[in-house]
Each structure stands twice: as structure tokens, then as C-alpha cells.
């Protein structure tokens, strides 16, 4: 290394030092520490005591842990496909040459810039069993068949589907990414397909989808990760329901007890940081496995242009 | 077998906390420019409760010239105090929830107040005998005092006299037994004649949902047996309590009740069902009067003990108080205790608002009942709450219930709440809901005691002073067994 190269290196490191320190102190160290704590009996207030695999063994027999995992997987299994369909459909519509296209694009993106807490409070009222807008619309319709709408968030069998519906509200970000992907689809392909007499559906299926498949892949992975980590909405909603003073229970009747909510209460209320760290690492492994699986599947169906 | 791990790894959280605090220090420090010792006090309340405490802090700061208490209103008090204590830089005084007391002292995070009480020239017995007995019980854990009350309260049945009149009931006579409570509720229930939907109900066990854990105690049951084991599913009186919960789901219809309940507003709002006239009776704390003045002025109501559920127990109430504690590692523990002692004292000869001191000043401003046995005549005669005597009497009941002081209480209370949910929603019969929660808590309680034991042994191996004092052979603390005297 010449002296000039060394000087450049030092300058470069000096310029990035803030990030390096921040990364080390606020990310690398906590991540490494949490792995260590997951093998410890650790209450935050006392020094960790090494207990080997005990936390993991206990998690295997913890019914509420499995319940929270099931709740989360149920949510992800519905929210990811719904989000993908809604955001892709919106992107396709907004890609059509119509008057006021910029206006519509803005309107459909708007919900994504509303903070999650505000959105959650809003949906809390939309879903309200007695005064909610949604039920005000549904009631007369369902009356015709002699049924009445559910109390949504207050009803354990409808609370998760309600959250799934709510998640479709925030698809703006993936919609924009889809839109960018759609603009990259070569127009010539559509033109030649039209000349050959391909229907719009066939053009979508054989041209659009394969061309944007990397974008679909990216969005699905991102929304899968986000769904498995869903926290804020649930925390606000489970705590904002009438007569539900403690969001940590995942009320009603634990139907909204999601993985991260259980992790949070275990760590900071029950003072079992070691146990919660083990949960965090299981979630990490779960997400990693799902991503790798998706990667394998994608190898066959995702087409990259070059 | 637990093993020791390198000390360097323990430095991490401290370094982190230290970095954060250095960054914050510039913004927060506004030390008085005199020789006084600065005591940092974190409190969770906002609004009127905070204003009252702030006034009490100011009164303390004026009352002497050696200590200056710096009052900070902090949200998420439990987690912030916890992390600050773990990081080795806690406030000198923190106003935490009573349910934090046992868990935190199991983790060695709180300074026992006994030596400080004794240093002030009184025995602990003398000091604590000044309180109504129920309040002394929630301050002590494992034979030591770990906190002293700051927002004391007893709870009562509140009933809406106007709705009683409309239903043809005597507005001056509250229900005296749970059977009467049920009968009155039936009479006070109104449905929309066209749709059959509920528009008003008498009483609803879930409202406000803060004392669901106390239903078993009210019915003569227990949460822990005499040996300190979980007794949720083994005490037959507990089953009675949750059958009582189920009774109301049957009365109103579980689903209909759920829909009706979803229209309830939050407590601090005019839409709170008792304020809005949707419920005619509710168990609420002494604070309700102040909220009513703000959100439902002129509401004609009365206060009475919880109706009798078990003749052997008779009248019942739940006692609550927040706890002023000194976290482990506080820099000015002695001065902090002087402040706590001031808040927990009173001028029993006070003849005007200006002469009120400590607890009476705080409780006068917060419109609550003082937990001390002796009240100054002025405080008793001029208290802003019209029914303060009811609450004073309630605090004296031999069967005043309170949260059990046990290290896994956060979790236990959640489990009991889930039992109530499952029963109320008619998801499962009370027996099954209780059995599920019981099994879970038994396991968790065993684990907790194991963990406390393990931590103590580890601390002794490290040769930590505090741990060495309490013998390693000593078994982990068992909580106040019966929870009821």
C-alpha cells in the first residue's frame, strides 16, 4: 500500500467512522449480545447466568408461544397474497394512460405516508362493531339475508381478518415499486403480441408477469418479513379497544397476540430477556428459512433481463 | 449447571446507557445553582395527578434548604426505570406501579427502605403502623419495605341515581349482594324495541377491566394458597367468581354484549359508558369524581362498597397505590428517602389548605383518600370528594383486596384476564379456562422461583455484596400467602 493509498484509506474510514461506530454499538453488539442472552437466564436487571439450551427447550413446550406463532403465520398467509394482489392490481390500473393519472397515483399512495399509529386509530373506528362505518354499510346489506355484521376487532374470530383488511390500506410502497417495474416492460413485446392476437389477460400472463417477476419476488419477500414482524398496529389496536386496558394480552381472547407482542411483553414486562432473545432468534431463523425457500422457488420462475 | 461468563460482556449495556445519557445530559441538566443535593424524581402521571404531585414536590423543596427534588414526568415509567437501573444510572426516586414491586425486588433492582426508615429514628413497625393496614401490605415484600404509596385509592360501586329512578328502583339504595346486583341489572337493562339491541345495561363485570384478578378474592377465593402455590383452578370459590362473570354474558347475550361493549369510549372521555349513561353501575376508584366533574358534570351518583359476594368476607374493596421506590444504584438514596418520607407524612393539626403537608396535600389535590390512619380535621371536613368518608371506611375493611406481591404478577394478571375473556365470550366453560391458566401459571411460577434461586447462587459465586448478605441457602421468597388477612 502506497502512502497515498493509506491516506485515502484513513480518510475513507474517517468519513465512514460515524456509521461504523453506530453500526457496531447499536446493531452489531446488540445482535451478538442477544444471541448470547438467548442461552442465559437474564432479567436485564441482573447479570446473565448461562443455562445452555433451556430457553429453547421451554419455548418448545410454551403453548402461548405456539399460539402467537400460529396467529402470526395466519396473518402473514392472508396479508402477503392480499397485499400482492391489491398492490399489483393498483399498479396495473395506474399504469394505464388515463386523464389525471398523476392525481390517482398520488391518491393511492397517500395512505402510506400516514403514520401507522394514526392509521390504526382510524381503523379502530372504521371497524367499530356498533358505530363503525364498515358495519353501517354492511348492516343493511346483510339484513336482506337475515345476518348481522361481526364486531370485527372485538370478535376473536374476526379480529385477524380485520387486521388483514387493514394491511391492504398500506400497499402504497409496494405499488410504487410495481409501477416502476411495469414501466420497464418493453412496449415492443406488447405490440407484437397484440398483432398476434393475444388477449389482454394473455399479455399480462406471458409478458408483464415474467418481466416484472424480480419485482414481485422482492415485494413478496419484503411483505413477508414485515407481516411476520407486525407489531405497531396490533399494539395500538389491542390497547385501544374499549375495555381492553392492556394491549399485551392480544385481546380479544389472545386472538391478536402476535409473535412480536409476546416477545415484547416477555422481555420488558415479565423480565425474561433471555427467553425473549431466544424467541427473537427463532423468528430470525424462521424468516431466513422462508426467504431461502422463496429464493429456491424463485430460481425457476424469476427472470432477470440480463 | 449455570456458569459464569466473562465480565466484559456485562459492560455492553452500561456503555450503551452511558452513551445515551451523555447525549441527553446536555439537554436535561438544569441543576439549581446552589449547594442543595439534587434528587431526580421520575413520575408517570400527566394531567391533574401530575399537577398535584408537582405541587407537593414544590412544597417539599420550600420546606427545607438542603435538598432539591427535580420532578420529571416520564412516559413508560416501568421500562425506562428498569433500563436506567440496569444501566447503572437510575433516578433517585421513581413512582412505579405496585405490580412492579415484587418482580423488581426479586431482581434486586430496588433498595429496601427498612434501613432508611430506621435511620430516621423510628422502627419499621412504628412507621408502617401509621397506614391503614391494607396499604402496609402492598408496601412489603419478602419481609422488607420496598416502596411507599403515592396515589392511594380504594374502589367502590358507583351507581347512577337518575337511571335507578327511571327503572323504578330506590335511588338511595345500592345493591348489597351480588344477587341484588344481578336483579338490579336486569331492571336497568334497556333494549331498542325495534331491533332488540342493547341501549343500556345495569352492570357489566368487564367495566373497567382493571380488577378482574380480584373477582376470585371478592368471592372468598385465592390466587395463591397458604403454601404459596398457584390456586387458580384448585380453589372452588374462584370458579364461583367466573360463573358470576358468565351469568352476565347469559343475561345480555355474549355476542350482543360484545357489540354493545365495542361502542364504549375510553375511560378519560365523555363516552365512558358510565358517564354516557350506558351502564348504571360500575366499580371505580376514588378518582372517578374528578373525572366526572370534567366529562359528565352534574351526574347524580352514589358510592357504596362492592356488593357482598361471600357472606364470610362481607363488604369488599380493592386497594391500590402507586409506589415511590428508590432504584438500586440511586446516587442520593438518603435524600431521596427524606422526600418519600415527606410525601408520606401529614400535618394532623392542619386548620387550612396552606397548612396541609405531604400526603394530605397530595390527596387533597388529587381528591383521593389518604392512606394514613389519622386525618387532620380540616382535611376530613373540607375534602373535595363528596363521598370521601365512604372511601376512607372502605380502606379500613378487613377484606380489602390488593394485587398479590409475587414476581410473576404481570403474567398472572394477564392469564386471569384471558380467563375472563374466554368466559365472557363463552369460548369455553369457566372450569376449563381456569385449568388452562392454572397449568400455565404453575409452570411459570416454578420457573420464576428457580430463576431467582439461580440468580442468587450466581451472585454469591461472583461474591456480590448484596447477595452475600442474604444467604445462598435461603429459598426464594414466597409471597404473602393468603392475600387476604
Image: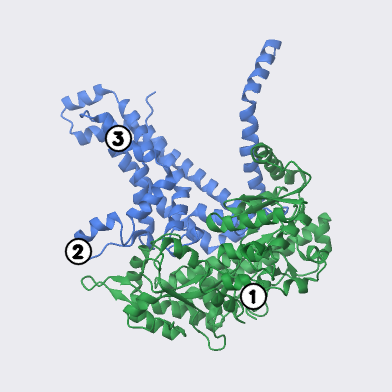
Q: Earlier in the sequence, mark 2 or mark 3?
A: 3
From this viewpoint, is residue A288 visible? yes
Name the quadrant of the N terminus of chain B.
bottom right
Q: Are marks 2 and 3 in contact (CB under 8 Å)?
A: no
Residue B134: assigned label: 1
Residue A91: assigned label: 3
Task: Locate residue A138: give its quadrant.
Answer: bottom left
Tell me whether marks 2 and 3 sit on the same chain.
Answer: yes
Residue nearest the viewer, comparing B466 with B227: B466
Chain of the residue that carries numbered disc 3 in the rendered image = A
> Distance between the Cα atoms at labels 2 and 3?
35 Å
Chain of the residue that carries numbered disc 2 in the rendered image = A
Residue B125 pos. (x, y %): 77, 74
Residue A52 pos. (x, y %): 68, 55
Residue B320 pos. (x, y %): 59, 69
Judging by the rendered image, the residue that carries numbered circle 2 is A143
Query: Helix, strand, or loop for circle 1?
Result: helix
Residue nearest the viewer, comparing B1 with A260: A260
Chain of the residue that carries numbered disc 1 in the rendered image = B
Tag count in the figure? 3
| Colour assignment, chain A | blue
Q: Nearer the viewer, mark 1 or mark 3?
A: 1
In the image, the chain rendered in green is B
Task: Locate residue A104: give its quadrant.
Answer: top left
Tell me whether marks 1 and 3 sit on the same chain.
Answer: no
Query: Helix, strand, or loop for circle 2?
Result: helix
Colour scheme of the picture: by chain
As displayed, is residue B289 above or below residue B223?
above
Query: Helix, strand, or loop for circle 3?
Result: helix
From this viewpoint, is residue B231 visible? no
Residue nearest the viewer, comparing B217 with B192: B192
Amino acid at each position: 500500500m502506497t502512502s497515498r493509498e493509506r491516506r485515502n484509506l484513513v480518510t475513507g474510514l474517517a468519513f465512514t467512522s460515524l456509521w461504523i461506530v453506530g453500526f457496531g454499538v447499536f446493531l452489531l453488539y446488540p445482535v451478538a449480545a442477544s444471541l448470547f442472552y438467548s442461552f442465559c437466564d437474564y432479567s436485564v436487571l441482573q447479570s446473565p447466568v448461562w443455562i445452555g439450551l433451556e430457553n429453547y427447550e421451554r419455548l418448545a413446550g410454551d403453548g402461548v408461544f405456539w399460539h402467537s406463532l400460529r396467529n402470526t403465520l395466519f396473518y402473514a398467509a392472508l396479508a402477503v397474497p392480499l397485499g400482492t394482489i391489491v398492490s399489483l392490481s393498483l399498479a396495473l390500473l395506474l399504469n394505464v394512460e388515463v386523464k389525471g393519472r398523476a392525481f390517482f397515483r398520488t391518491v393511492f399512495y397517500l395512505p402510506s405516508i400516514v403514520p401507522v399509529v394514526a392509521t390504526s386509530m382510524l381503523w379502530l373506528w372504521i371497524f367499530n362493531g356498533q358505530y363503525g362505518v364498515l358495519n353501517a354499510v354492511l348492516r343493511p346489506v346483510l339484513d336482506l339475508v337475515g345476518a348481522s355484521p361481526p364486531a370485527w376487532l372485538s370478535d376473536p374470530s374476526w379480529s385477524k381478518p380485520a387486521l388483514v383488511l387493514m394491511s391492504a390500506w398500506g400497499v402504497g410502497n409496494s405499488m410504487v415499486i410495481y409501477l416502476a417495474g411495469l414501466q420497464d416492460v418493453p412496449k415492443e413485446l406488447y405490440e407484437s403480441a397484440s398483432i398476434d392476437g393475444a388477449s389482454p389477460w394473455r399479455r399480462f400472463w406471458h409478458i408483464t408477469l415474467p418481466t416484472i417477476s424480480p419485482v414481485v419476488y422482492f415485494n413478496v419477500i419484503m411483505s413477508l418479513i414485515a407481516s411476520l414482524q407486525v407489531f405497531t398496529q396490533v399494539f395500538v389496536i389491542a390497547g385501544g379497544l374499549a375495555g381492553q386496558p392492556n394491549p399485551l394480552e392480544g385481546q380479544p381472547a389472545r386472538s391478536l397476540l402476535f409473535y412480536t407482542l409476546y416477545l415484547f411483553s416477555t422481555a420488558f414486562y415479565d423480565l425474561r430477556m433471555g427467553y425473549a432473545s431466544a424467541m427473537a432468534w427463532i423468528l430470525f431463523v424462521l424468516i431466513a428459512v422462508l426467504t431461502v425457500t422463496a429464493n429456491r422457488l424463485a430460481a425457476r420462475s424469476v427472470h432477470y433481463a440480463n | 449447571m449455570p456458569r459464569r461468563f466473562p465480565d466484559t460482556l456485562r459492560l455492553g449495556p452500561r456503555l450503551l446507557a452511558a452513551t445515551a445519557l451523555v447525549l441527553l445530559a446536555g439537554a436535561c441538566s438544569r441543576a439549581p445553582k446552589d449547594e442543595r443535593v439534587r434528587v431526580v424524581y421520575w413520575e408517570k402521571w400527566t394531567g391533574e395527578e401530575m399537577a398535584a404531585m408537582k405541587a407537593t414536590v414544590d412544597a417539599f423543596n420550600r420546606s427545607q434548604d438542603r435538598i432539591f427534588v427535580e420532578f420529571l414526568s416520564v412516559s413508560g415509567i416501568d421500562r425506562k426505570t428498569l433500563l436506567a437501573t440496569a444501566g447503572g444510572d437510575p433516578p433517585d426516586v421513581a413512582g412505579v406501579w405496585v405490580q412492579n414491586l415484587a418482580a423488581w425486588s426479586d431482581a434486586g433492582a430496588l433498595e429496601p427502605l427498612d434501613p432508611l426508615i430506621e435511620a430516621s429514628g423510628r422502627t419499621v413497625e412504628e412507621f408502617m403502623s401509621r397506614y391503614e393496614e391494607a396499604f402496609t401490605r402492598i408496601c412489603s415484600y419478602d419481609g422488607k419495605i420496598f416502596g411507599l404509596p403515592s396515589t392511594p385509592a380504594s374502589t367502590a360501586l358507583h351507581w347512577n341515581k337518575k337511571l335507578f329512578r327511571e327503572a323504578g328502583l330506590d335511588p338511595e339504595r345500592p345493591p348489597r349482594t351480588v344477587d341484588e346486583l344481578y336483579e338490579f341489572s336486569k331492571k336497568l337493562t334497556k333494549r331498542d324495541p325495534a331491533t332488540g339491541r342493547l341501549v343500556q345495561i345495569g352492570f357489566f363485570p368487564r367495566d373497567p377491566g382493571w380488577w378482574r384478578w380480584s373477582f376470585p378474592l371478592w368471592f372468598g377465593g385465592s390466587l395463591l394458597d397458604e403454601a404459596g402455590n398457584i390456586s387458580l383452578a384448585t380453589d372452588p370459590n374462584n370458579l364461583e367468581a367466573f360463573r358470576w362473570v358468565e351469568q352476565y354474558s347469559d343475561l345480555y347475550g355474549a355476542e350482543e354484549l360484545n357489540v354493545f361493549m365495542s361502542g364504549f369510549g375510553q375511560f378519560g372521555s365523555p363516552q365512558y359508558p358510565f358517564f354516557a349513561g350506558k351502564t348504571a353501575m360500575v366499580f371505580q376508584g376514588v378518582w372517578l369524581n374528578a373525572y366526572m366533574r370534567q366529562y359528565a358534570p352534574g351526574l347524580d351518583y352514589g358510592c357504596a362498597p362492592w356488593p357482598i359476594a361471600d357472606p364470610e368476607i362481607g363488604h369488599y374493596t380493592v386497594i391500590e397505590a402507586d409506589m415511590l421506590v428508590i432504584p438500586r444504584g440511586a446516587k442520593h438514596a438518603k435524600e431521596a428517602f427524606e422526600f418519600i418520607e415527606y410525601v408520606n407524612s401529614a400535618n394532623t393539626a392542619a386548620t387550612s389548605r396552606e397548612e396541609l403537608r405531604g400526603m394530605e396535600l397530595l390527596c387533597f389535590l388529587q381528591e383521593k383518600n389518604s392512606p394514613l390512619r389519622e386525618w387532620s380535621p380540616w382535611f376530613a371536613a373540607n375534602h373535595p370528594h363528596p363521598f370521601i368518608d365512604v372511601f376512607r371506611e372502605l380502606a379500613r375493611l378487613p377484606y380489602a383486596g390488593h394485587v398479590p406481591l409475587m414476581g410473576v404478577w404481570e403474567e398472572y394478571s394477564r392469564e386471569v384476564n384471558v380467563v375472563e375473556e374466554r368466559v365472557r365470550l363463552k369460548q369455553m366453560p369457566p372450569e376449563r379456562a381456569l385449568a388452562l391458566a392454572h397449568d400455565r401459571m404453575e409452570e411459570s411460577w416454578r420457573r420464576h422461583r428457580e430463576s431467582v434461586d439461580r440468580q442468587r447462587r450466581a451472585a454469591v459465586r461472583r461474591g456480590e455484596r448484596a447477595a452475600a448478605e442474604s444467604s445462598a441457602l435461603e429459598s426464594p421468597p414466597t409471597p404473602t400467602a393468603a392475600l387476604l388477612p
